[in-house]
Image (cartoon, grey):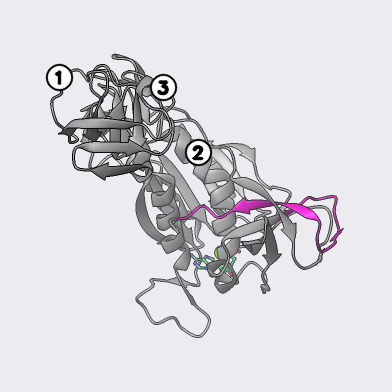
Amino acid sequence: MRGPCSSASVSVWDALGLVLLHEVKTDREYPPFDRSTRDGYAVRSADIKLGAQLKCVGEIKAGDTVTQPLTPGACVQIMTGAAVPVGADAVVMIEYTQREGELIRFERAAQAKQNIVPRGSEARAGQTILKAGMRLGFAELALAAQVGATQLQCAKRPRIAILSTGDEVVLIDEQPGAFQIRNSNSVSLAAQVRIAGGEPVVLGNAADRVEDLGEKIERGLKEDALVLTGGVSMGKYDLVETVLKALGAEFFFDAVSIRPGKPAVFAVCKSKPVFGLPGNPVSTMVTFQLFVTPAIDLLSGGDAHPLALVEARLGQALNERPGLTHFLPARIEWHGAEPHVSALKWQGSGDIAALAGANCFVVVPSEREKIASGERVSVLLRKDVV
Ligand code: AMP
Ligand code: MG
């Protein structure tokens, strides 16, 4: 499943979230000169003793070319980001000085090297600073921009087909009949595909009929991966697995010991990864995060990120049925020195509102029934834009 489908040269302005396909090296040393990290005075540290006075012989702004070496007994006013002159080995912060005309009185002793970042200490010239396979976030893009790498060869976003199923499902801008529902899963899935770095290709909804499902699944298999929702449970009209089998799919799992999301399916059909996620909206969203997000990492040409798990202290006690690993919609917040997490009230897997208020899931291991308030628990952070 690994590997990008194709690559493109992308401007650094447009490469957020893409996977880089080549190394980026520095074009020169960083910093390219001995750089002052403070506004103050460049000095020879040996000249400074408590209460020392030195003559200020000039000023260096960030960007100035510095040619004059600093002579003993003198100092130069210097700004943050400016080049430290030859001869100076320390910068004293302006806050620790008094100025009387050309004379500067130093109220603190200076240590050699203080407030100076030496030339080449952040990176050598030609050093690799970004590796192939890295996903480009804001800091990685800034690094590329810093070294002048304004065009980057990146993997194209994998195209992820999204197909919902169910005779009860109508378009979101249609008025549903009394027993129908709007296709909210296609909306959450398209958003989750984008967050994971893919490009959603929304194929609409298939009826619970073999022919319609078959046609639309085959259409979905033209993309890099296919994600279905609904139709994977045990009901008479849950036909996704039947249709996939008829198309020659090889199944890797057809149920998972988790709640929500037990009926989730993963298969490879006509060489394309296919996820059959349960139709209940919370199950769809949770199983996407658990199974599809890492697959999109791989399809994007990068490594699969480990699950975003953290530990927190449980607010209210929990009592869950053992046998399945539970992922309970929850909120994690800092209280004092550590994070606390509380599961939210929810009405089961159809309760989108519970998930809309959640920023994480409490993970309850399958062997646990009761967890007392105050215990440390694992928390899966909700992968999102907020
Ligand atoms: P299923 O997995 O097909 O048995 O569907 C389970 C339940 O999920 C259905 O009864 C619907 O209430 C809900 N559901 C299925 N598909 C969607 C969808 N596309 N959008 C929102 N809810 C859905
Ligand atoms: Mg259904």
- Does the residue at mark 2 contact the one at mark 1 (Cβ under 8 Å)? no
The answer for how far apart the CA atoms under marks 3 and 2 are is: 52 Å
- Dot 1 falls on a residue whose secondary structure is loop
Q: Residue placed at 23% from the left, 22% from the top? A: 85
- Check disc 2 and give the amino acid type: Ala
Structural distance between the alpha carbons of marks 1 and 3:
20 Å
Q: Position of residue 238 (x, y in %)?
A: 60, 59
Magenta region: which residues? 363-384
The label nearer to you, 2 versus 1, is: 1
- Quickly name the residue at label 1: 68
Label 3 C-beta lies within 8 Å of the nearest ligand 1 atom: no
Write down the quadrant of residue 136 in the picture: top left
28 to 374, vertically: above or below: above
Give above or below for 115 relative to 29.
below
**Is 373 inside the magenta-drawn segment?**
yes
Q: Find numbered disc 3 in the image and state the secondary structure of the residue it sits on.
A: loop
